[in-house]
Image (cartoon, helix red, strand yellow):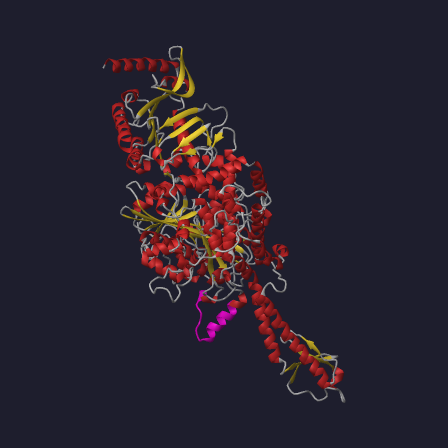
């Protein structure tokens, strides 16, 4: 059995010393008694004394600590229950809470510091607590186990599992855990020992005895970081000795919330590092095709789902691999009305003016959110409410939502038809213009009635690429071990800025559909391809270092400048405003470096915009918008050809009055006169009070006729009057002591006096100095707030440069040999024609192919040919050509003409979904069913070897029926690769079907097959599968037997 605390034998740690290095516990600044040999959190004093008397405990391995063996700690492990007593296996188990008894038993005997850890842990049981003790973050019990196993920490000596690290290493260990799916709660000391004494004294003065925890030093959670709520703050950076900057983050970082009611889906996505939020609400099919497409195009790291929605949780979890968090309906995942109330109460958005409608609480909210409220998009609003609740738990809701970066996600196949509007503005221009309008200001009351402004918010229709297509065509990720090489994004991604790279990824995941939208972007790309000087000038300007991730910087500096981040003991302020950081000056230096980096980055953006100011203006409207300076307000940017790049010089010059270079080194901010009016006024007030004291001393010298009077300051009294001892003798000037003078000190040579008339002047000085000091401390935050006041202007410049960066990346790929601009035809043509086309991601010598479907040619191509003959490559390159063309990029071909494609469907390869109970054949049919349901005459469909997952006759029958549906019902452009030669021959005479095969040379009676990788007309005579078996080096006996059986089967079928 498990030994009791009183009988446990000392653990022999000598055998483990080679694997677990020793480490001394960090020194705490607290004065709570801690036994020298026992760990800080030992509850059983008898056990501690027992081990004190015997052999000291060394470093124990995992599984041998206090929480592993003692029943009092079983609430962390085997006896784990949530606050309502539910076990982990219960479907309603709430992992965020933990039931533990702190009022009786061993845990009740813990110190105040220890009890506070348990209080925090039981309300945040799903988090690893980084618990601040002095200058170190400590991990205890099961948290220590996680830190050792997952973050490379080591156990300290003792029976209590305990590990830790210094304050400056927070970013390293936080990211080590969060990147593996853990949540990290940072618990800080939020008062000094002196402040604790003052607070406790005040409680006692009211006649109440403070409790044990209340009497201890106050500690609060100051941040809660999860995979979907990373913010990249200064605390998250690596230590300077480790190179600074942030730990590399691989994979998704978005936070999402999904709500399903019947066939309707509501979703909200939040990119916490940039403070951007997207809402969505749409009808979906039984396979959740649109939801899967959304999650594939914008993969989240964390998804919030209502508790009880097990099927939804299973679908989104398997579709993304993200962590799924189950939230309580109503309380944590609120309904629409409760979500609106919560957003209104949060203070993230301005309150509606008194002149507005009484029931229109969203009148001054971001336009998209306002329209969601007015249009009763209840599921989307509920999802926003869930995201807001999760952000509030992480203490960042106000900081992120007040960025006002709220947009709408519309499924690619549901984009708004621009024909209905009188005014048309191409999509990319509209996005730049929206940023310019926000920077110059717009009256939201006039917005709804302004067709031009409404046209800017048009949701451009997109080429729909569902999750299956993105995967099969390797658009964003590849099958390469690194998941990146060989993907289409890898081919295009040469952006020099992080925000440009994000924009390019969005363009590629969601290409445009309207020909005018595509042509506007492609015109800009073409000009960059053909104008060498323009391309080189912009490339050189962006190539230079100095442009940080400004999108993220704007959010970080917005947070640092928030009013609730002001240093304050007020309980309504953010806990971080009260946090006691021992390396505060180093973190302040990092904060200033962020600001200085942002300012320098914006200056670099201005350099990019001015790179071609002495050259003729670009011809492409999109380039002109991004490069030319804006000349005025919203009315001016409407003009055709008007520039959108804002004037940055005047606003940036306002920060020249701060010594940012020195502040980056010291963490101390010094401002020149005239820069900070509040600080200047406080400094003037203090100086005036000092001048008043000096004036009083001059008057006293004159009235008393004693010129030797001077000020003396002591530890207890400031501004005592010091007079020489000689002035107090007979006949001395101070023989008769003036009224109101009280002696405070005496030496052989002088005496010091507190003067009654001086006391009010000293009080006034101390009050003004206190104000000046508070303003000095808060000066850095107010500096960030001043920077944030022009956030819309900075964001406009970032949007312009991001667009230029993404366009340059497309142009760089388009300048490669063998690429051409695709010619977009009218949608009614519904054709695609490619001459000498190749897959752009293939390297080396590639055999080009011509391909034409639709127009003068039948819209369906039945493709046969030998195994490994290039059928799948041909199918893929046709789809990739359409995607590149509608992204605005050139296509790898001698010539390409196509009508815009509304959706690309792919049915490729063989795979199963065992965990979902779906066989390979079932997966094939589910994907095919989605194609047959959603394909339109403007779609492009490729199917490769449909029906091979079942018996030959059944598979051939299904394949034949699918071809029939595509030809007679869907009437879409379709490429159908198959080895069913009877199927191919049965459609040989149909007017809407053309036959093709990948050509090859057959030698030695089929013993040797040479692949030509060239598309030819007609049907292939065989698939030559035995030749592939020979290439795979199957034994000769097996090959010979296979050849015999093949001839036998073929003869038997021919006879029939």
Task: Decide which of 781, 873 is in the foreground and name it.
Answer: 873
Q: Nearer the viewer, residue 240 or 19?
A: 240
Residue closest to the eye, 161 or 249:
249
Q: Is residue 206 left or right of residue 786?
A: left
From what the image shows, is residue 37 above or below residue 936? below
**The residue positioned farthest toward the top in the image shown:** 1004
Q: Is residue 248 visible?
A: no
Specify the segment rendered in magenta.
Answer: 196-213
Tell whether position 210 is magenta.
yes
Instruction: From this view, report whether residue 541 is shown above or below residue 749.
Output: above
Dominant secondary-structure state across the stretch colored magenta: helix
Res 691 quadrant in image: bottom right
Q: Residue furthest left?
A: 1056
Residue found at x 44% / y 76% = 207
Tally the numbered discs: 0
Q: Quadrant of the C terminus?
A: top left
Where in the figure is residue 61, as x and y percent of width and height? 48, 46
Give the residue at x 28% y 15%. Answer: 1049
Left or right position of 727 against 344 = right
Q: Does 1025 appear above or below 206?
A: above
Could you tell me residue 886's position as x and y percent? 42, 37
Instruction: Please provide percent x and percent y for residue 252.
Output: 44, 44
Q: Position of residue 40 (x, y in %)?
A: 49, 57
Q: Is residue 864 magenta?
A: no
Instruction: Answer with the quarter of the image where residue 760 lies.
Output: bottom right
From this view, report whether residue 178 is shown above or below residue 650.
Answer: above
Q: Is residue 93 visible?
A: yes
């Amino acid at each position: 059995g498990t030994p009791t605390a009183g009988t446990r034998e000392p653990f022999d740690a000598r055998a483990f010393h080679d694997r677990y290095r020793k480490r001394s516990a960090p020194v705490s600044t607290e004065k709570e008694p801690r036994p020298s040999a026992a760990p800080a959190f030992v509850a059983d004093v008898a056990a501690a004394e027992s081990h004190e008397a015997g052999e000291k405990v060394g470093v124990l391995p995992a599984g041998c600590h206090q929480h592993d063996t003692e029943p009092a700690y079983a609430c962390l492990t085997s006896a784990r229950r949530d606050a309502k007593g539910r076990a982990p296996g219960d479907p309603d188990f709430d992992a965020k809470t933990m039931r533990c008894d702190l009022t009786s038993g061993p845990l009740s005997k813990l110190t105040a510091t220890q009890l506070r850890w348990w209080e925090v842990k039981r309300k945040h049981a799903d988090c690893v607590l980084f618990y601040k003790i002095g200058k170190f973050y400590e991990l205890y019990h099961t948290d220590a186990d996680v830190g050792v196993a997952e973050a490379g920490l080591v156990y300290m000596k003792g029976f209590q599992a305990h590990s830790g690290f210094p304050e400056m290493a927070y970013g390293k260990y936080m990211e080590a855990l969060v990147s593996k799916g853990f949540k990290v709660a940072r618990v800080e000391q939020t008062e000094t020992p002196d402040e604790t004494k003052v607070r406790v004294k005040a409680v006692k003065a009211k006649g109440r005895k403070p409790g044990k925890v209340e009497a201890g030093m106050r500690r609060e959670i100051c941040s809660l970081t999860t995979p979907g709520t990373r913010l990249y703050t200064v605390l998250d950076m690596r230590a300077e000795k480790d190179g600074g900057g942030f730990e590399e983050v691989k994979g998704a970082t978005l936070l999402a919330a999904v709500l399903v009611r019947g066939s309707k889906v509501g979703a909200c996505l939040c990119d916490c590092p940039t403070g951007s939020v997207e809402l969505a609400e749409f009808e979906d099919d039984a396979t959740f095709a649109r939801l899967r497409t959304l999650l594939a195009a914008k993969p989240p790291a964390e998804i919030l789902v209502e508790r009880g929605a097990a099927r939804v949780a299973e679908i989104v979890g398997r579709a993304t691999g993200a962590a799924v968090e189950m939230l309580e309906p109503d309380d944590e995942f609120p309904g629409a009305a409760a979500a609106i109330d919560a957003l209104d109460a949060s203070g993230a958005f301005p309150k509606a003016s008194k002149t507005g409608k009484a029931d229109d609480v969203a009148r001054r909210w971001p336009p998209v959110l306002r329209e969601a409220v007015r249009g009763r998009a209840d599921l989307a609003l509920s999802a926003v409410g869930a995201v807001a609740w999760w952000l509030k738990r992480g203490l960042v809701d106000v900081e992120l939502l007040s960025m006002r970066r709220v947009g709408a996600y519309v499924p690619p196949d549901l984009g708004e038809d621009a024909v209905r509007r009188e005014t048309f503005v191409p999509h990319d221009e509209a996005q730049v213009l929206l940023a310019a309008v926000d920077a110059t200001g717009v009256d939201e009351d006039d917005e709804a009635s302004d067709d031009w402004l409404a046209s800017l918010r048009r949701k451009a229709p997109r080429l729909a690429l569902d999750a299956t297509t993105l995967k099969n065509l390797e658009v964003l990720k590849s099958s390469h071990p690194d998941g990146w090489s060989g993907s289409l994004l890898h081919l295009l991604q040469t952006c020099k800025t992080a925000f440009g790279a994000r924009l390019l990824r969005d363009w590629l995941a969601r290409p445009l559909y309207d020909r005018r939208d595509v042509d506007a972007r492609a015109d800009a790309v073409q000009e960059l391809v053909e104008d060498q000087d323009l391309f080189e000038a912009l490339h050189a300007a962006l190539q230079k270092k100095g442009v940080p991730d400004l999108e993220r910087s704007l959010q970080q500096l917005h947070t640092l400048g928030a009013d609730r981040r002001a240093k304050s003991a007020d309980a309504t302020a953010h806990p971080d405003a009260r946090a006691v950081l021992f390396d505060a000056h180093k973190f302040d230096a990092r904060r200033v470096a962020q600001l200085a980096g942002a300012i320098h980055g914006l200056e670099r953006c201005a350099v990019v915009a001015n790179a071609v100011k002495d050259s003729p203006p670009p011809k492409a409207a999109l380039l002109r918008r991004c490069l030319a300076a804006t000349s005025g307000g919203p009315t001016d940017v409407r003009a055709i050809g008007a520039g959108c790049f804002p004037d940055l010089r005047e606003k940036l010059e306002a920060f020249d009055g701060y010594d940012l270079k020195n502040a980056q080194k010291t963490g101390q901010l010094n401002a020149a006169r005239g820069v900070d009016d509040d600080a200047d006024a406080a400094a003037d007030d203090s100086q005036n009070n000092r001048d008043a004291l000096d004036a009083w001393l001059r008057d006293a010298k004159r009235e008393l006729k004693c010129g030797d009077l001077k000020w003396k300051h002591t530890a207890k009294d400031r501004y005592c009057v010091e007079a020489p001892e000689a002035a107090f003798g007979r006949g001395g000037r101070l023989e008769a002591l003036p009224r109101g003078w009280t002696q405070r000190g005496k030496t052989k040579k002088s005496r010091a006096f507190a003067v009654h008339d001086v006391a009010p002047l000293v009080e006034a000085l101390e009050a003004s100095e206190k104000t000046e000091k508070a303003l000095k401390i808060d000066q850095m935050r107010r500096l960030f707030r001043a920077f944030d006041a022009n956030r819309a202007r900075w964001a406009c410049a970032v949007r312009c440069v991001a667009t230029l960066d993404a366009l340059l990346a497309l142009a760089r790929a388009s300048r490669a040999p063998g690429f051409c601009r695709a010619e977009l035809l009218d949608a009614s043509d519904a054709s695609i024609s490619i001459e000498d086309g190749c897959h752009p991601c293939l390297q080396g010598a590639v055999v080009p192919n011509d391909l034409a479907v639709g127009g003068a040619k039948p819209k369906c191509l039945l493709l046969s040919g030998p195994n490994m003959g290039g059928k799948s490559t041909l199918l893929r390159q046709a789809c990739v050509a359409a995607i590149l063309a509608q992204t605005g990029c050139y296509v790898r071909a001698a010539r390409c003409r196509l009508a815009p494609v509304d959706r690309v469907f792919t049915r490729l390869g063989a795979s199963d979904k065992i965990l979902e109970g779906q066989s390979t054949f079932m997966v094939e049919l589910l994907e095919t069913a989605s194609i047959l349901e959603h394909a339109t005459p403007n779609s492009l469909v490729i199917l490769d070897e449909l029906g091979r997952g079942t018996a030959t006759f059944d598979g051939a029958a299904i394949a034949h029926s699918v071809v029939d549906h595509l030809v007679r019902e869907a009437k879409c452009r379709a490429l159908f690769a198959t080895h069913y030669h009877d199927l191919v021959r049965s459609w040989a005479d149909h007017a809407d079907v053309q036959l093709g095969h990948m050509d090859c040379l057959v030698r030695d009676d089929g013993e040797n097959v040479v692949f030509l990788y060239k598309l030819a007309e007609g049907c292939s005579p065989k698939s030559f599968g035995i030749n592939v078996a020979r290439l795979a080096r199957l034994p000769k006996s097996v090959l010979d037997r296979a050849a015999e059986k093949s001839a036998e089967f073929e003869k038997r079928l021919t006879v029939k």
